[in-house]
Image (cartoon, grey):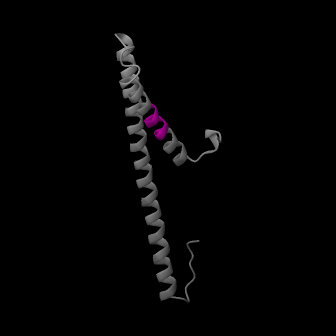
């Protein structure tokens, strides 16, 4: 597996969210099956708090990813809008030069 340092921010968000969700699911399955009778007292509370923390962390990462995706889409729409209108302007007035570049 590649080191996390070389990954894009989107890939890091997606992988970290997936790993947190996987950890929560595995803890849920383990806690409800073979650890059910072994967990008692503070171990029981600690175990389920950690499982809950992984779940909340996965939700937070998903929300951050959705916000970043919205920002990315908004920027792409702005760029598309600018390029479309500059193309229309060039087609409408072919004798003018684009001085914005």
On whether residue 19 falls in the magenta region, the answer is yes
Q: Between residues 21 and 63, which one lies in front from this camera angle? A: 21
Q: Residue furthest top?
A: 41
Using the rendered view, name the quadrant where residue 21 is placed. Answer: top left
Quarter of the figure with the C terminus: bottom right
Write the residue at 38% across / 33% down: 55
Q: Between residues 75 and 70, which one lies in front from this camera angle? A: 70
Q: Between residues 18 and 3, which one lies in front from this camera angle? A: 18
Residue 20 in the image, given as x and y percentages of width and height: 46, 34
Residue 92 in the image, given as x and y percentages of width and height: 47, 88
Q: State left or right for residue 14 relative to residue 53.
A: right
On whether residue 22 falls in the magenta region, the answer is yes
Using the rendered view, name the quadrant where residue 100 is placed. Answer: bottom right
Q: Note whether 22 is above or below 51 in the view shown.
A: below
- Predominant secondary structure, magenta span: helix
Q: Note whether 70 is above or below 40 in the view shown.
A: below
Magenta stretch: give its range: 17-23
Residue 24 in the image, given as x and y percentages of width and height: 42, 31
Write the residue at 35% across / 11% down: 40
Residue 70 in the image, given as x and y percentages of width and height: 41, 54
Q: How many marks?
A: 0
Quarter of the figure with the N terminus: top right
Write the residue at 47% across / 82% down: 88
Write the residue at 46% across / 56% down: 72
Q: Between residues 70 and 93, which one lies in front from this camera angle? A: 70
């Amino acid at each position: 597996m590649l080191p996390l340092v070389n990954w894009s921010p989107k890939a890091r968000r997606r992988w970290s969210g997936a790993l947190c969700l996987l950890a929560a699911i595995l803890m849920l399955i383990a806690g409800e099956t073979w650890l059910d009778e072994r967990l008692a007292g503070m171990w029981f509370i600690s175990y389920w708090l950690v499982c809950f923390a992984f779940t909340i962390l996965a939700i937070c990462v998903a929300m951050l990813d959705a916000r970043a995706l919205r920002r990315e889409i908004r920027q792409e729409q702005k760029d598309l809008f600018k390029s479309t209108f500059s193309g229309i302007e060039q087609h409408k007035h072919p004798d003018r030069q684009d001085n914005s570049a």
